[in-house]
Image (cartoon, grey):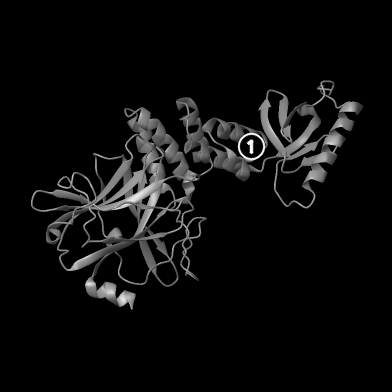
Amino acid sequence: MLPDNVPQGNVPSMLDQRYLCSLLLCVILACLGSPARADLVVFSNEQEMNGPDVIVEDLQGDTIILLLHGAKLERHMSVIQSFKIDVEPRIKKATNSKDLLKLARVCKAANQPKAVAKAYKAALDTPPPIEDEELLSIAKFLEKQEALRAAANAYRQFVARHPDRKDIEEHANKLYEQAPPEMPTTSVPKPTTVAIAKRTPIVPIKRAEGLEAKGPWVIEQWGNAGSTRIVASKTEEDENKVLEISFTGTDKHKTAARRKEHHDLSRKVEMTFRAALDLDIGRPRIIKIALAFYTLPGSVFYESKQFSLKPNGEWVPISVDLSASDFKSEASNWQHTSPLENRDKVEKILILVYNYNKAPGVVYVDDLYFKSTDEVTDQGQ
């Protein structure tokens, strides 16, 4: 516990300075040999306080609230020259949107707009939901910082509660279209990289584009509202196109992107692709993906097993065995025990994205191919 007689006035007294010096000494000793980053506080007497157990907790009027080794210390802003927030570990430790909004407020006071944007992005993706007025304020701030994708997500969260606001929905869609594609990282060794936005981009595959790039892919109305677009990324040697599927943070956890085209898959035994999360979502989450088919006659629906995506944005290679009896359909009572019947008469292909976090996000799909027995055998040799 801190002693009750620590001065709280506008000007640091001699006792106050001695007390601060003793705290600083404790923090310095605790941090010796530790490379950990932390918040930094510089006092008006040029003394600095920095270490893994130094946290600028909050600002209330003219008072700054610090946590030193878990103990609370309040000081008038007149004794503070400056402070800087180490935002990344604070975001990782936050468990709710209220803490993240408080973190954004502190970063704003520290004149760290990029840190504010990071905290806002994380808050948009963390429960509980943000109030409408603050949600619009966040969207405007992110738009001003040119974080267009995140701003669009904030506006879309507002529209999800107010579907009559077509003006805001239209504005969000325009921002999303203007936003540069931000590709996830890849685990392919020694890749030829693609210079897109600020991400480590994907590796183009030097062969004909898969179905992901041929479109059109349309979002089914019975699922989660979302959108699709095909984004192109160029290198010095090649151009690779990727299907981008966005989804909103509503109670409907399934987003379905549909491509209508007749296929005879009787000679195909496997459908392969790779998928990845957009890292701009900022928070770890549970996202799964599956394929589905409508076959004739009768537009019978068959769905494959689900595959989990990695929260760190790495590509996940996925293979669906078209000859297996692990699809689900109405005839199998929605158990994964059915073969893909009439696969010589496929009329629609769907990519299903399962979002179990009720938060908006983006998934990329690439290299979507059908493979025959010979192609699968050749690759296995």
Residue 255 location (% of width, % of height): 31, 44
Q: Please tell me whether residue 373 is drawn above or below residue 224 in the rendered image.
A: below
Residue at 66% over, 38% down: 111
State left or right for residue 238 relative to residue 130.
left
Closer to the camera, 104 or 379?
A: 379
Q: Is residue 41 visible?
A: yes
Is 192 or 232 nearer to us in this picture? 192
Quadrant in which residue 26 is drawn: top right
Q: Quadrant of the N terminus?
A: top right
Which residue is pictured at 80% across the width and 41% down the height? 27
Could you tell me which residue is drawn at 82 percent across and 45 percent down? 29
In the displayed structure, does residue 98 sit left or right of residue 52? left
Q: Secondary structure at mark 1?
A: helix
Q: Position of residue 60 (x, y in %)?
A: 67, 24
> Picture quarter containing residue 47?
top right
Residue lying at 47% horizontally and 33% vertically, measured from the top left: 127
Whether residue 10 is situated above or below residue 23 in the rendered picture = above
Q: Residue tagged by mark 1?
A: 107
| 85 displayed left or right of 324 | right
Q: Relative to the observer, which residue lies in front, 87 or 32? A: 32
Percent coordinates x, y for residue 306 in the rendering: 32, 51
